[in-house]
Structure formats: structure tokens, C-alpha cells
Image (cartoon, rainbow, N blue to C red):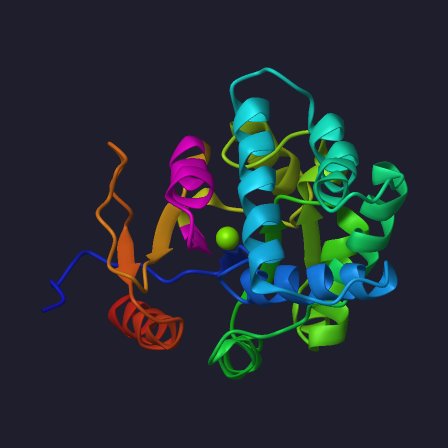
Amino acid sequence: MEEVRDVKKYQTLLFDVDDTLLDFAAAEDQAFRLLLQEQGVSYKEEWKRQYQQLNQGLWKSFEAGGITRDEVVNTRFTLFFEKMGKKVDGALLEQSYREYLGEGNQLLDGAMDLIAKISNHFDLYIVTNGMSATQEKRLKSSGLYPFFKAIFVSEDTGYQKPMKEFFDYCFDRIPSFNKETALIIGDSLSADIQGGHNAGIDTCWINPLKMDNSLDVQPTYEIAKLEELFLLLKREKQSSH
Ligand SMILES: [Mg+2]
């Protein structure tokens, strides 16, 4: 059961995008299929699996400091198509892939309903890691875009979640921003919850798979579904009057 807590009314809600409002796996899958199609290759589950393995391996090398981000994205398709004996320009294909990814506008269940419902009562902002053009395009074509007062994408800020500097950049650009009445909502412990903690604001972890919390940091709230946020906000608002 929910505990009765000393609650307050929130004014500023900062939303993550991927796997919070939009379905990233669906966007990736669609982009991958379109890329294969563009290259005249028929889709096979096996190829998707191989690509994922290769892609994850490259990102691991990046995280370990072995290669740069650009090297990851500009070589992943060169290496992947090499596996099928096809020589391609990886950097060029990455551009196509990103275009296709920008078409990935699959809303998660309840996302539109929730955002539309709360947008008159709170100031909504997007805080997302990624490429600005891609994220903006996805938010626009999903229909979510007009509900947000501003979209903050890591590429524009020069920093990324969970860095405090990323949030400082956002806070500086939110009119009469107050940390006490701000809440970040996201699915990632390491980016969103750690980020909110670093920035000194309350956090709401969306945890549909009921994963264990691997951080030392406790989220202020934990919900399994986005819809639960509506009740949470309503409750907080009522109890602050
Ligand atoms: Mg996310």
C-alpha cells in the first residue's frame, strides 16, 4: 500500500522519452527493417539478433572508453553488412538509420491520454538523451510535442543525463524554476533517477518489470505503469491544500 507522506504540489514535470512515453524497441525494430529494405535485403530474425549483439558489443567498448560514440554509430552497419558479404558505407547508412529512427513514433500505452490530461495543470518538459533532430521528429509525429513547453535533448546541451550539468542547463531555461516543485519521470535508474538525485529534485521511477533497484539512490516514487502517475499527482495536489 502507498504510504501517507509529507507531500507537496508539483509544478514542473520533466519527462524522459524512450520507454517512458515512446516505445524505443519498436522504433529501433522498424528502423532496422527499413534499412534492410533500403539495402535490398529481406528481414530475418537471425539478422536482427546478430545486429543487436554487434551493436551492444560496440556500445560496451564505448562505455569502457575503447572507442568513441562516432565510431560506434559509423561502423556498426559497416561491420554488420560485412557479415553478409556486403560492403557498405557505414556512416552513410547510419544517416539513413537515424532518419528511419525518427519515424519511430509508437506511443506507449496510456502516454497520450496522460500527457493530454495533465498538460493543463502542470508545466511539462522533455529531458532526453539522444540526437535533437531524431527526438524532435518522433515527438512531433507522435502528437506529444505540443503539450511540452520545451524539449531538452542532450546533444544540444553538451551534457547528458545523469550529469548535474545537463539538468543545470535545463533549469536555467525553465521560467521561474523551483527545485522543490519539480519532478522527473523516467524508466532508467542510471539516467533518470540518478540524474534527478544529482540535480536535487524528486524522482518517479517507472518500473513495469518490477526490477530490483541496483542504485544506492531511492526514487521518491515508484510506479509500474504511466497511468499511475495521474493518481499520484492528483493525490499530491490534494494533500498540499
Ligand atoms: Mg528511457
On-image quarter of the C terminus: bottom left
Could you tell me which residue is drawn at 83 percent across and 58 percent down? 99
| Lateral position of residue 27 relative to residue 229, left or right | right
On-image quarter of the N terminus: bottom left
Position above or below: 217 against 111? above
Q: Is residue 195 magenta?
A: yes
| Lateral position of residue 149 relative to residue 218, left or right | right
Q: Magenta span: helix, strand or loop, mainly?
A: helix
Could you tell me which residue is drawn at 54 percent across and 75 percent down? 115
Q: Is residue 75 magenta?
A: no
Position above or below: 68 against 106? above
Where residue 175 sits: x, y (%)? 66, 50
Where residue 105 sits: x, y (%)? 68, 71
Where residue 209 sits: x, y (%)? 29, 62
Could you tell me which residue is drawn at 11 percent across and 62 percent down? 3
Q: Residue furthest top?
A: 66
Where residue 46 sits: x, y (%)? 56, 57
**First to last magenta residue range:** 181-198
Could you tell me which residue is drawn at 36 percent across and 47 percent down? 202
Residue nearest the observer in this picture, 28 or 154:
28
Position above or below: 95 against 197? below
Residue nearest the observer in this picture, 48 or 223:
48
Q: Residue furthest front?
A: 85
Badge count = 0
Residue nearest the observer in this picture, 144 or 44:
44
Position above or below: 205 against 217? below
